[in-house]
Every structure is written in C-alpha cells, then in structure tokens.
Image (cartoon, grey):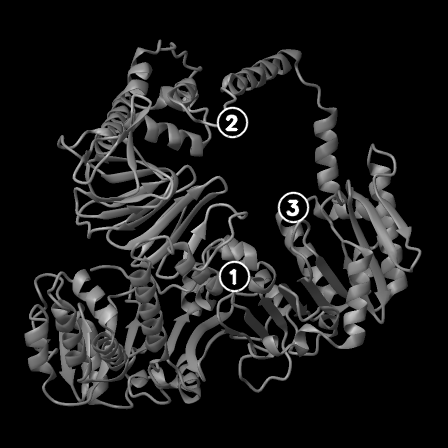
C-alpha cells in the first residue's frame, strides 16, 4: 500500500493547520501575485516555435536566448547557429538592447566590500571573454575541408540554390553541403580526418580555437578522426554532441533522433547534460523510438563497409581473448601482514599485476601477428612506429614486478597527533638485483641502507628500504625506521595480537585477490563530538570496529564481500537485521522479477521503539503529538501496528515496468485481524481530518481481500491476507498472480538465473537480499544506451546480507545497479596528511 498521502503525523497536521489559518497581509499577496504574473508574462513572451528551419526562426529566438528563457537544448542550437551564421550575428547586434532594471539588492550585497564585488565582476568578465574567444574567435582563414571523391552528385547550397561540387573543391567556413539521392562523398578536413557521407546528407563544417565542428543537419556520416593533440573533433546534431580525439565512428541523424555507433576507439556523447562513453561495437540512440541495430548493419552503406566489419570482428575476437586471460591467482598466505604498523588504520592488499599484464601483451601480439586486418589498423594507429613505447613501458613493469612477490600491501597509520601519516608500500623480494633495477628504472628514489643512521631528507622524497627479503617505499623516514625494527625482531610487534590482524588473517586463509580494511573504531571515536555520542549509540555504530572488503575471482565469477564488526553485540538500528533465516515472503515473487529486496528483521516493535526514542531526542513535543494522534485514531501504534507484524519485509518489481511499475509488497503479519483493524482506523482518521469527504475508500473486494482507492486518481492498492502474509499490489490481477506463483513454485529463489548468482559460502539462509535483473525487462530501454552498455547495465546482480551477533556481512556477485560493493559502501581510504 502506498503511504504517500497518510497525513497522520500530528506535527505535520499542526503545521498544515497553522499555514491554512494564517492571515496574510493583502499587500503581501498583491506583491506575490505581481511577481508571479511577471514570470508568467516572461514565459509567454518566448516565441512558440516548434520546428527551427530558417534564419528567421533562429532570429525570433534570439531575444529569449539573450535573456536566458530558452530550454538548454534550444539555447545550444541557437549558440551553434550564431557561430556559423553571419546574418544572424548581424541581426543580433542590430537588435535594440532592452534596458535592465535591477531588483532591490539583498542585505548581504550591501555588507560585501566593494573591492570583492569588483573582483567578482572582473573575474566573471574575464572568464566570459576567455570562453567566448575559445568558442567564437575565428582561426586562420582558408578552406575548412577538401572534397576527395564524389559518388553521384554533391552540392553547395549557395544563395538558396544548389551548386555542383567536384573533387578537389574546397569547403569554406559554414558552407552547407548536401549529397544527392544515391550519392555520397568523402571529405578530408584540415587536420587529416576523413568524413564519408551517405546519400541525402546535409552538413556544415566550421572551425574555431576549441576544435573542428561538423554540424550534421540530416543524414549519416562515418568519421575517421585523425589523432587530435590539443583540441577534439565534434559532430553535432539537434539532440547530442559527439567529441573524439582520434577514432572511427558513425553518426546517423533522422526524424526520430540520432544514433551514434563506434567502430574503433572511444567516443564521448553529450546529451541532456550527461556524457556517455562508447567503445567499439557500442552505440547510443537519443530517442527510445530509435531502436538499436547491429553496428555492422549501421555502416553497411559505406564504401569501406567490408573493412570496417572486418575490423569490428577482429577487435571483438581480441577482446574475448583478453577477457579469457586468467587473472592473478588467489593468495592464501602472506608474510607482509605481520610487518604492518602496530596502529594500522588502513590496510590494502592488491595482486602483483605484472604477470597478468605480460600475458595480455602476449595475447595481443599473437593476435596482431595472425590478423592482417588488426595489424594494418595498429600500424595506422601508431603511424608506422609500431608499439615501441608500449613495449618499453610493459618491459619496465615486467622487469620491476618480476622481483616482487604475489602481492603489494599499502598501510596507513595515524601519528601521535592523530593525523594519518604518509602511506607505506610493502612487498616481498623474490630474487636479487632489485636495487640495481630501482636505480635504473626510478633513479629519483633514494635507497636507504640503514634507516637508523640515515639523515632525514631535506624535502619530501621517495625512500626505499631493502631489508630481510622485503622492499618498502615511503616518504617518511620514521616509518622505515620502525619497519626495520619489526623486520629485525620478528614477533616483537603487538599487531599480530590485535583483532584486526585476526580478521585479516582469516580473510587470507579463505583466499583473496584484493583486500581492503579500515579501523573504523579509531576513526569514529576520534570524530565523535559530545552531541554526536548519543546519536551514534542509537544508530548502533558507537562501538563499530572494523570494515573489511574483499574481491576475488572464482570459476569466472566475481565475488565481493564486506564485513562490518562491532566490539559488543549489535544494538540500535544496527541490531534490526535478524540472524540468517528463511524468508517465506519471497515465495510470492516470480523468477521474472526485475527488482527485489527482502529483509528479515528481529522485532518490528523494537524498531518502532528505537525510532520513537530518536524522535523524542530530536523533538521535545514528539511524545505529546504521538499521544494526540493515538487519542484521535483510537490506535496504539506499538500494540496495533508493530506487534502484529512478523519479521519479513519483501518489496519487488515483478511484471511490466511501464507505464506503471508492477510493484509488490509482502509483509509477514501474525495477527491479521488486529492489523486490518488498524488499517481501517487510519483510513477513517485520514478521511475525518481531510476536507474532502471520502478522500480514501477502503472496500472489500468481491474476490476477497481489500482495495484502497483515492490515493491518487486512477491509482489503487489491492491486498489480501493469506497464510500469515499481507500481499499487496497495484491491481488485483498482480495479487492473484503472486498467489499462483507461490502455489506453482515458479519463484525467484528457484530460478536457475538467480541461483547462478549465489555467492559460495556455508550459510543456507540470509538476513537480507538485494537483487536486480533489469536487462530482462528493460531490454529495449537499455538497448537504446548501446549494445555493450546494455549488456553491462542489464547484467543481473545479487547482494546478500548476513546478521551476526557482533557483525554484519555482505556478499555479492557483479554490481548492483551499476555500483560495485565498494561503491555502495562508499569505501575510501583515510585522508593522508602530506608532510
């Protein structure tokens, strides 16, 4: 059921009544009406031009553009046209300037020093001038492009009439070029880029300090962009702006919108204030009605279609082979953990990626050798210089990593003042000769022979310590001095006796690829202020200890785990999550669900009690307001709403997403009679408090159950009580389908697709679940983002939560709604104070 319009909070009721009964000064009302009318008049003055076709249309929009009353998309079109059209710029300059009448200044304006105002104005003028110069200042005169070849006919639109264009002709700034039916052309820009046009294509080419711009009015182009050193190449349509610095891509612009597809390289597409990055084989449509097609089909009209298709195929094969290269193996033991500082606040372990990078390079070279198409492409990209630079970099990485063990550890510790020191990097040394390699590859690093006798550097400098089969790098000499003592006297450190060490050692025993941990006990304890102590206690994080996050690859599946531990049994909000247990409410969710969230909570009544205590602490009148509400409604919130509930809450989107999401709510209810009576009392109170008679209608449904109407016009909530559960949905058909799913057993938990996402562990149950399979339902919508992006964004993912006595654990596969586990946890290392 929706709670969107349950105005039952007495505090809110009082506020509404006070606003409703407030007597407003007629002068204030008149002034407000005047301001509103002024805004409405301004909006009404904006010309209602639906389609922009001629200079007259653009000139009609110029006043609204100057006054900032145009939508962002239209403003962008006017700006682009103004830069290319001398006539419209002249019309703009000739336009009568409307005097500006400033509004009364606010009080802070009078208080601001005049020099600060002058400086702000000067800065604004300077920045405006800079961007205007970059955007509009003309570059060297001359043709912007040359026609290399023509198939059929190519025309320049001169004085409104077409004039034929032959190969070798130049194209001037802003000239409109059009290909005829069954025709096409290849145009070479001044930077060497090639633009191939299909039939019935119209475009303009202009150049400014910020780059070369192709304005595609209609039709399609395939651009082989030359490598840009300092400024990008743009292709602009009415809906989007494509920018590249050297790649091959196509842009198709028609009545339904624009579609951008990438053949090679990387393309940035800006639309509606957002920028998306496309890579080979991916595409983007600016309108959902413009469905994606195979990129090979998109470029089939090109004279070079065969070579483009071959390149796409080879790049796809190369990508598959690179993805098949096994990643670093799991690390089950370490010598570096015992060397971490005693007061380690942040510990991170990453695998030595040198061998994996070397294998990727080997696979790439093999594919280059066996594929003439790929070899020609690579030679063209590197301009005949081969991959000498890449070879040199990878050789250095392989050479350096070849001396190191399977992992590289980073630790950060606080100093005596509580500020985090410079990080310490640690690795095992597996063979001799590393010192000479450091001198050769990184001569700026200073080798420390004996930290105890080494003078402190005059300025911040990378220092390297080689000792006892380990290498350590830091800018802090004191860090290296303490590390040397730990290496020389194994077992003297107290860190191996700490709880954090025990947690990390347990993670290593289970195998890790990437491991991150943070000592939250120190961070939270240091940040707590007296007024925050009670808040942290109610939330249940006042005794938080450690956060440990792991990532590993198992059998081709990525797994992410996080562990949040506490010094005592969980309390406050952190205690709401129950221990792992069966969640029967998921039996009402089908295998086709696109979103699902399910939780087992300890005690709903205790959750309500905790919330009330938090509200009482923040609002002295809360208890009084709650008593008034309970007196009016005849309800006891704790006894009538919370205690009848069990411990299961399930929310899902299980069915069509458009035009209205097929939401589904399942609550475990032990005392259905009492809970139903509470619902009826709340509806009665809402209608009694509302001015509109019968605003909400709760009726018994003919087929059993109930229907709640009046939440919004045309929006309903249907629900039934069955076997200890309340099952609600926006229609009776969805409720009945949920009951059939439970009866048939075709549930989400029994779906092979769902089962394949389950992380491997010893737990038969879970405390919470977050699942999505958007690709199954929103395929067409995701496809509009591009085939590759659709596959990535639509890939199903699962995240499970486990509540323990003194911990909460998360385990997941893939990403959830495009966010990794680390993103969801907002995991960041401590801020390091630079010395």
Q: Quadrant of the C terminus?
A: bottom left
Q: Which mark is residue 619?
A: 3
Give x and y (percent) for residue 220. Answer: 37, 45
- Spatial distance from mark 1 to mark 2, Cα to Cα? 37 Å
Mark 2 vs mark 3: which is more N-terminal?
A: 2
Find numbered disc 1 in the image and state the secondary structure of the residue it sits on. loop
Please tell me whether residue 778 is drawn above or below residue 31 in the rendered image. below
Is residue 327 rendered to the left or right of residue 568? left
Find numbered disc 3 in the image and state the secondary structure of the residue it sits on. loop
User: Viewer-proximal residue, 229 or 536?
Assistant: 229
Please tell me whether residue 77 is drawn above or below residue 795 in the rendered image. above
Q: Residue at x 52, y 73 (%)?
A: 812
Q: Which residue is mark 1?
A: 817
Which residue extends farthest right?
Answer: 702
Q: Residue at x 32, y 42 (%)?
A: 235
Q: Which residue is mark 2?
A: 50
Q: Which mark is residue 268?
A: none
């Amino acid at each position: 059921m929706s709670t969107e319009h349950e105005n039952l909070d007495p505090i809110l009721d009082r506020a509404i009544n006070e606003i409703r009964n407030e007597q407003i000064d007629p002068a204030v009302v008149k002034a407000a009406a005047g301001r509103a009318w002024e805004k409405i008049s301004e909006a009404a003055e904006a010309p209602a031009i639906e389609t922009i076709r001629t200079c007259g249309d653009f000139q009609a929009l110029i006043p609204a553009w100057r006054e900032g009353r145009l939508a962002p998309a239209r403003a962008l079109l006017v700006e682009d046209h103004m830069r290319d059209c001398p006539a419209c710029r002249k019309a703009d300059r000739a336009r009568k300037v409307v005097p500006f009448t400033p509004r009364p200044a606010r009080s802070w304006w009078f208080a601001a020093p005049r020099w600060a105002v002058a400086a702000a104005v000067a800065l604004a003028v300077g920045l405006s001038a800079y961007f205007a110069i970059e955007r509009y200042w003309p570059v060297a005169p001359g043709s912007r492009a040359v026609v290399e070849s023509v198939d059929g006919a190519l025309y320049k639109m001169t004085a409104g009439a077409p004039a034929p264009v032959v190969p070798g002709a130049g194209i001037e700034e802003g000239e409109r070029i059009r290909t005829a039916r069954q025709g096409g052309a290849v145009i070479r820009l001044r930077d060497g880029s090639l633009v191939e046009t299909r039939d019935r294509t119209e475009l303009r080419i202009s150049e400014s300090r910020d780059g070369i711009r192709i304005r595609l009015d209609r039709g399609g182009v395939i651009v082989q962009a030359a490598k840009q050193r300092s400024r990008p190449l743009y292709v602009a349509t009415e809906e989007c702006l494509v920018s590249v610095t050297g790649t091959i891509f196509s842009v198709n612009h028609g009545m339904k919108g624009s579609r951008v597809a990438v053949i090679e390289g990387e393309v940035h597409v800006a639309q509606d204030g957002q920028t998306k990055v496309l890579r080979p084989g991916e595409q983007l449509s600016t309108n959902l009605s413009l469905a994606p097609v195979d990129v090979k089909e998109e470029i089939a009209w090109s004279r070079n279609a065969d070579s483009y298709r071959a390149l796409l195929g080879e790049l796809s094969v190369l990508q598959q082979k690179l993805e098949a290269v096994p990643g670093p193996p799991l690390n089950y033991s370490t010598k570096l953990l015992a060397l971490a500082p005693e007061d380690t606040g942040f510990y991170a372990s990453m695998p030595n990626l040198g061998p994996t990078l070397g294998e990727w390079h080997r696979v790439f070279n093999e594919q280059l050798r066996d594929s003439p198409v790929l070899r020609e492409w690579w030679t063209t990209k590197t301009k005949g210089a081969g991959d000498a630079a890449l070879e040199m970099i990878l050789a250095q990485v392989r050479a350096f990593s070849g001396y190191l063990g399977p992992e590289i550890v980073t630790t950060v510790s606080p100093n005596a003042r509580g500020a985090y020191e410079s990080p310490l990097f640690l690795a095992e040394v597996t063979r001799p000769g590393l010192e000479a390699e450091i001198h050769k590859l990184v001569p700026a690093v200073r080798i420390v022979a004996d930290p105890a006798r080494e003078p402190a550097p005059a300025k911040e400098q990378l220092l390297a310590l080689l000792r006892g089969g380990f290498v350590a790098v830091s800018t802090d000499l004191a860090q290296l001095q303490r590390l040397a003592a730990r290496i020389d006297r194994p077992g003297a450190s107290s860190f191996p006796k700490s709880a954090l060490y025990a947690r990390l050692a347990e993670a290593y025993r289970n195998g890790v690829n990437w491991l991150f941990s943070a000592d939250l006990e120190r961070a939270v304890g240091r940040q707590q202020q007296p007024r925050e102590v009670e808040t942290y206690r109610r939330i249940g994080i006042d005794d938080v200890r450690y956060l440990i996050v792991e990532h590993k690859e198992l059998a081709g599946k990525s797994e992410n785990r996080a562990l949040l531990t506490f010094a005592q049994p969980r309390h406050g909000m952190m205690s709401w999550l129950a221990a792992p247990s069966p969640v029967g409410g998921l039996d009402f969710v089908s295998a086709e669900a696109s979103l699902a969230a399910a939780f087992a909570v300890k005690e709903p009544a205790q959750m309500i009690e905790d919330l009330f205590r938090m509200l009482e602490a923040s609002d002295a009148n809360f208890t009084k307001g709650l008593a008034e509400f309970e007196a009016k409604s005849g309800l006891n919130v704790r006894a009538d709403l919370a205690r009848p509930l069990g411990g299961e809450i399930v929310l899902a989107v299980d069915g069509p997403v458009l035009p209205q999401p097929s939401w589904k709510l399942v609550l475990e209810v032990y005392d259905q009679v009492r809970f139903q009576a509470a619902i009826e009392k709340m509806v009665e109170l809402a209608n009694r408090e509302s001015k509109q008679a019968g605003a909400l209608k709760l009726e018994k449904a003919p087929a059993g159950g109930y229907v709640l109407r009046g939440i919004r016009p045309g929006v309903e909530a249907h629900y039934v009580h069955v076997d200890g559960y309340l099952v609600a949905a926006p229609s009776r058909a969805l409720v009945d389908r949920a009951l059939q799913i439970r009866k048939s057993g075709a549930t989400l938990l029994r779906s092979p697709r769902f089962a394949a996402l389950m992380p491997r562990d010893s737990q038969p149950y879970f405390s919470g679940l977050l699942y999505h399979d958007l690709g199954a339902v929103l395929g067409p919508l995701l496809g509009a983002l591009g085939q590759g992006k659709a596959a990535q964004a639509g890939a199903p993912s699962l995240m499970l939560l486990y509540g323990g006595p003194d911990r909460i654990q998360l385990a997941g596969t893939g990403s959830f709604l495009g966010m990794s586990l680390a993103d969801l946890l907002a995991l960041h290392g401590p801020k390091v104070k630079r010395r």
